[in-house]
Image: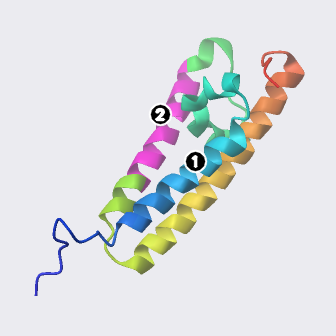
Amino acid sequence: MNTSPTPLQPSRSLPWVGIYFLAWLLALLSTAHTRAALTVAWLFPIGLFGFIDLPNGREGTTVSWFFACAWLIYIVHAVIYFRARQPTSKFFLLIALALLLTLNVTGCRHRIAEGKQAGFIHFP
């Protein structure tokens, strides 16, 4: 029996896609409160390592590796999530995404507070 949706029949995975992007949107909105903050939204994944003391200055390559690893974590998760077929698998992967995004938002807020205190960040 063919269970694939016809062009006129909505896909069963559409709500899962919406939930996935809604989770990302909520994380973005809870981190970037201003237009100035939105300009650095592409740096969001580095918040996963927000509580690790990242080096400054000449050791910027280390920060680049952390940044690349953070994006890679989200890319791998997205591939696994969108390839999953069972609703139970998608549900647990969505919980994993929620935990990752929560850690990420918390790390970003920690870094933003540090940056404001040090005078590096000037947006409210």
How far across and down, in percent of the image, does residue 108 sit? 71, 38
Q: Which residue is mark 1?
A: 25
Give the structural element (helix, strand or loop) at label 1: helix
- Residue type of the residue flagged with mark 1: Leu
Q: How is the image coloured?
A: rainbow
How far across and down, in percent of the image, does residue 2 sit? 11, 81
Is residue 31 rendered magenta in the image?
Answer: no
Q: Is residue 61 left or right of residue 76?
A: right
- Residue type of the residue flagged with mark 2: Ala
> For the magenta stretch, what is the residue range?
61-77
Image depth: mark 1 or mark 2 in front: 1
Q: Nearer the viewer, residue 37 or 84?
A: 37
Identify the residue at horizontal 39%, vertical 62% (top origin).
Answer: 81
Identify the residue at horizontal 53%, vertical 20% (top origin).
Answer: 61
Q: Which residue is mark 2?
A: 68
Of the 4 image quadrants, the one containing the C terminus is top right
Residue 80 in which image quadrant: bottom left
Marks 1 and 2, the one that precedes in the sequence: 1
Identify the residue at horizontal 43%, vertical 42% (top origin).
Answer: 72
Residue 90 in which image quadrant: bottom left
Of the 4 image quadrants, the one containing the N terminus is bottom left
